[in-house]
Amino acid sequence: MRRDHESPRATAVSVPAAPRREEDAAASFGLPGPISDLINRTVRSTRLWRSERAEVARELGSHFAEGLAAGRSERDLIESFGDAGAAARLIRRAVKRRRPLVWRAAAKTAKGAGFATLGLVVLFVVLAVRFSMGTPTVSRNVTAELNARHAHVPMSERAWPVYIRAVPAFTRESDVFRSEWPGVRPGDDAWGATVAWLRDNAGALEIIRDAASRPTLGVDIGNTYDPDYAAAKAEAMGEAFGPLEPSANPMLLEVLLPQLGEFRAFAVALMQDAYVAVHEGDGDRAVANLVAISGLASHSQQQPFLISALVGIAITAMQSEHVVRLLRERPGAFSDANLRELAHLLGSPRTDDAMRIDFAAERAYFEDFVQRVYTDDGRGGGRLTPEGFRLLRALDSLSMDAVGTHRMTDSIVGPLAAIVVGNRREITSMHTRLMSEAQAIAAQPLWRLDTSRFDAIVDGITATPILTARYLPVVAIVPVVPRSYASAETVRCRRDAALVVIALELHRRRHGDYPASLDELVPVLLPSLPIDRFDGNPLRYALRDGRPLLYSIGVDGLDDGGVPPKQGPNGAGQWRSPAELAASLATPIGRDRHRGDWVFWPVMEPREE
Amino acid sequence: MRLERELMRGAGPVAVLRLLSVRSMYGYELVDALARRTEGVLAMGQSTLYPLLYNLEAKGLIQGEWREGEAARPRKYYSLTGSGKRRLESDSKQWAALAQAMTALGVIGPEAEGVGA
């Protein structure tokens, strides 16, 4: 015994090779079966690497062999060993600490990643369950509310059923004319065909004039086409037209407004017919057409959507521009009575109404959208729903066709989107803030129009893709509102200029020449001096060689003495924010477009670069 | 008398380091020496000793080496490394300070007689 305890340095003779398996390691000591079993059981329980198990088995075998050699009994040794399971756990823990640093680092990383993944999976499952349980509460039927506004008007008095009767003529008509209308004049290639088409379809134009004279449009909106309209289109096209599944409460986003496209075509045809009329010396027909065009613009506005307002404004802009051109073309075609009627028309509340931007309708549009996207906790809050997520995805791709597809993707991406996209309260708050800014913008005259606060908010919520996604319901609906107001204001300026041109012509007829100042027109021919919307002063007027010059200083804010931009006068009439204007004027193309005055009279044609 | 597990956890490693500071020893020899020289106070079975040795080896305080001597049985001898010597020196001072503190408090030493009686 004592000799065994002597220093190994004096007795070591060789370093034996380690057995490769734990069974071989234990067996190499010739130990009794129960002890070998204990060693093998313990070592197996460690679940260490094979080489590590062999090493541990060898050391334990050596230990038991020493005990037996020292005279201890097999039973005593087994009892003193202790619990095999506990020993295996402690040995495993200790041996693993001896493993290479790289392995331990990798193992810890893998373990951490595993826990993190597990945590994320659990979190995702919780989110997915919560997301899938959300359902929107659609309590408001905005479409029905809008349709109820004209429900009391009998069908026989509504304009829309009459307009429908003119639709087939325009459905069959070739686009060749529309690309050049209005403004085709004698001598132009298309003049002969234009006159022929308008003559052949004079009945359709009469129908439009009749419809446009009615106060109420009376179209029932929905996610399907009006059956009479669809039938008229199908008859003209010779094929089925748009049979869709009607919804009792369609969202405003999917409401169809086919009348807007028809109205633009009607207005263009009426204006072109006015050109033909003045060349035929028929001022009454030209005025009747212009009156009908005001009716079309007004009817466009009767559906309180922003797109409807923009169509109404665009029709009014075309009307004001071409009234002036018609007066240049054949002033003699208009009687004094025609001119007075035109002046009353352009200055009428109906024309003013056609240039209105309705913010209340935009709010209704947004509220309808929100009620379909979020749950409603009754206190203004709510979370994104699966249905809402599909709507947002469709809105983002600008295609309603996407709704209802990609269900597998939705189940994975939807719960994550619920984290990214702002909740109901947050989105509503941002929309209210933006609309409040838009309302403040609409209270300013154009020459003091400052959209910087509104633009800063929009820039803030679109600064990154994540933020854009967070405020998607707002981003997709609101930003065009202030610019629409600016657009309406510039059209008012053009309309005011048309009123001056009419007054100038009447003055010439009464006095034989043009006035030296616009003051001479007030109040007999003009109720007041029209304002230049780009600086708040009266529109500029001068006589050059006895001929009138009428202009606005234009978007650059400088009086250039009636010299238009190089590209023509219309660029000077396009509103730009101060920052946009500065950026534009810093480039040659921008200067050619915006540096100069917006000249209304004499009529100047746009020039290409 | 056997020590509580927590006390054993603190005392066991320094006891093993102290034994190995004299000369290299193999596992059974360490078990035997600990039981004999401490009159059973620091006696530990294989299930305690070998994890303890592997931990000390993982920390670089001791190193093992298989050798075959006159007993014709391979034995794994453990010896102190440089780090092990420094750790033993540090731990010994701490244990001395602890013993002094415990004596001052009367936990150990002449004044401890009758404590808990």
Image: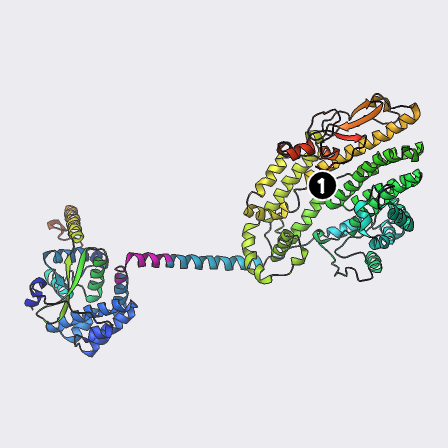
Q: Position of residue A200 (x, y in %)?
A: 91, 51
Query: Could you tell me which residue is drawn at 87 percent across and 53 percent down?
Result: A165
Magenta region includes residue A445: no
In this image, A328 relative to A572: left or right? right
Q: Confirm whether the magenta stretch covers residue A102.
A: yes
Find the residue positioned furthest to the bottom.
A33
Q: Quadrant of the C terminus of chain A?
A: top right
- Horizontal placement of B96 versus A237: left or right? left
Q: Residue furthest top?
A: A516
Magenta stretch in the rendered image: A94-109
If the image is split into quadrants, where does the N terminus of chain A sit? bottom left
Tell which subunit mark 1 falls on: A
Corner quadrant of residue B20: bottom left
Count neighbours of disc 1 (C-alpha within 10 A) and say few if under 14, some if 14 to 19, many if 20 or more: some
- Residue A183 in view of the camera: yes
How would you classify the magenta stretch by its main secondary structure? helix
**Residue matched to label 1:** A359
Residue type, numbered disc 1: Phe
Q: Nearer the viewer, residue A94 or A494?
A: A494
- Residue under the point 12% across and 58% down: B19
**Is residue B2 shown above or below A597?**
below
Q: Could you say which is closer to the camera, residue A313 or residue A322? A: A322
Q: Is residue B33 left or right of residue A235?
A: left
Kindly tell me whether residue B117 is visible in this rendering.
no
Color style of the picture = rainbow
Residue A109 in percent (x, y) is at: 37, 56
Q: Is residue B116 above or below residue A295?
A: below
When the figure is inspected, residue A15 is found, relative to residue A333, above or below; the finding is below
